[in-house]
Amino acid sequence: MILAFDFGGTKNTCAAFTRNDAGAYQLVALERRASPPRADGAYDYAVMRDLARGLLQGKTPSAIGVSFGGLVRASQGLVVLSHHVAGWENIFLRDRLAAEFQTRVELDNDANVAALGEARFGAGRDCANLLYITVSTGVGGGWILDGKPYRGANELAGEIGHTVIDPHGPPCMCGRRGCVEQMASGRAIARMARQALERDPRRGEILRARIDNDLTRLTGLVVHQADLAGDALARELMTHAARSLGFAIGNMLCLMNPARVILGGGVTHAGEHYFENVRAAARANVIPELRDAVDVQPAQLGDDAPLWGACALVI
Amino acid sequence: MILAFDFGGTKNTCAAFTRNDAGAYQLVALERRASPPRADGAYDYAVMRDLARGLLQGKTPSAIGVSFGGLVRASQGLVVLSHHVAGWENIFLRDRLAAEFQTRVELDNDANVAALGEARFGAGRDCANLLYITVSTGVGGGWILDGKPYRGANELAGEIGHTVIDPHGPPCMCGRRGCVEQMASGRAIARMARQALERDPRRGEILRARIDNDLTRLTGLVVHQADLAGDALARELMTHAARSLGFAIGNMLCLMNPARVILGGGVTHAGEHYFENVRAAARANVIPELRDAVDVQPAQLGDDAPLWGACALVI
């Protein structure tokens, strides 16, 4: 039995995988706990340990793969910090779990792990080289090159959300302007919606109704739902976000020529027109020789991608 | 004896490498021929064959590595086209040379080969992951990842010159706008110089003197020389080109986090202030975690990089 841990910031998930008679891996059990608002690293760790013990029922796992939503040094098994939760600074999580459960443990950040999950079990099974991009509150990414996670010299590769596509664009927390994250993330879509609704009080009727005209309630999800419900302004905003992402993908294709780009995360559930806009913008921003090779696909593993990827980490 | 062929468009070079008693490779002989204006593929091939026969003196080489200035499918040993010379369309050069010289042959494009040369023998000897960028008439690039050339799904990775850094920038032959090549190449520097001199007849005194005020004689090299001679306009143009390149490098560092970026090609001979501007712009365009890791170095092998790289291809 392989255990997979997903430290997700707002929730922690533990899953158990076994192989069936044909040798295929199967997710046979899953436990998930939402975190209370002021949970810290110690809380997360204790919850995960208890979930794992519940699934193990006294048995020892053959290995544990761990996905962590934060800055990680995979080669050292080190959590540098969490994007969401205090108390995770410089924790050697791999060794701690290995001692706790007396088994082999591998650890990586959630984007790299999801990339590996999609490559082994999801939308990238036939690709040696792929780029996985998660578009949710923020924008992250992970590379699989020659079938393996590619992490880079400082294990910081894949910071797609902080490549700049418009030097005069909106300011980013990283200190620069026009990062992909400021143009295409759920948070960016909510910001653009607020600005558009403030600018023109006659627009966005359906969108306004969904938030009772309370602009503090705007989220990427609300805009996406208003788009699907026929709101023209919401459609414009989703199209703009998709085209910004597609433009950035075009540059990445020129630079790295992966076989496929796989998109996961909440924003990418916006439907086929979202994907068509991403693809069109990517095709418009590659060299002619790559135009017919643009292959942008939705992730297949959904919320379980980190779990499948964590399993793949230790296979 | 290993032979290295460099089909360079305007010149063809053949070199012989042997190992010394300590096992180190040494370039022991080199023959170079400039091509006449209307040379074609058959001419290039015949010249290279004769240069090689002259170096071999009847012996058989243990292998031949080939650098080609054009679009190449390395896995098939296929030259798709030359950037400069007619008659190179869809030539299976690897197999042809293997039959001609009765030995093993490997082939790749000049940027990938130069990247490999710098990685094995030059400025990247201590780096598993590096990006090599050649900045001359155009801008090309090659990746070494985990010590090996990384070519991508369609063997088109490294098209750094055609990543877009300003969607509203000058038009490019590839059909888009604001490609790195239109902002940082020798041709771009010459174009920007012409525009600046036309706009303001009082500027660029030293630069104008070098071309007898004949703007058709502007080249990147002339601008670079005027910069070194103290021309303020030429300095501005070189700084702008360096900063455009550095901005693009920042994005690449966020995306791929190579240990080092190595710059070769004529424009990069512009001196230390050119490199300082590239580095400053790259540092200003990376996430804070990467700022101290920006490492941009001049190539060490100069014009011989394709030859050393071709040698490395077959080692």
Image: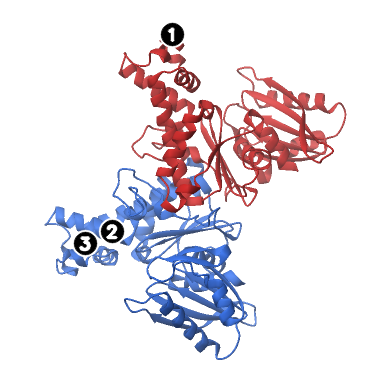
Chain colours: A red, B blue
Residue A307 % position (x, y): 69, 33
* Badges 2 and 3, same chain: yes
Identify the residue at the far right of this view.
Answer: A58
Category of crowding for the residue at label 3, using alpha-carbon neighbours closer than 10 angstroms: few (below 14), some (14–19), many (at least 20): some
Chain of the residue under the numbered disc 1 shown in the image: A
Q: In which quarter of the image is residue A298?
A: top right
Say if mark 1 contacts mark 3, CB within 8 Å.
no
Residue at the spot 37% in from the left edge and 74% down from the top edge: B10
**Residue B189: assigned label:** 2
Distance Cα–Cα, label 2 vs label 1: 55 Å
Q: Position of residue B233 (x, y in %)?
A: 21, 57
According to the picture, the residue beneath numbered tag 1 turns out to be A212
Query: Disc 2 vs disc 1: which is toward the camera?
Result: 1
Residue located at (18% from left, 63% from top):
B215
Q: What residue type is labelled 2?
A: Ile
Task: Specify whether disc 2 shares its chain with disc 1.
Answer: no
Depth check: B136 or A245 in front? A245
Subunit of mark 3? B
Q: Quadrant of the N terminus of chain A?
A: top right
Look at 76% across and 24% down and name the residue there: A51
Q: Name the residue under label 3.
A: B231
A122 left or right of B215 in image? right
What numbered label is drawn on residue B93? none
Residue B125 visible from this viewpoint: no
Crowding near pointer 1: few (<14 within 10 Å), some, many (20+)?
few
Q: In this view, does A187 lie above or below B66?
A: above
Kind of residue at disc 1: Asp
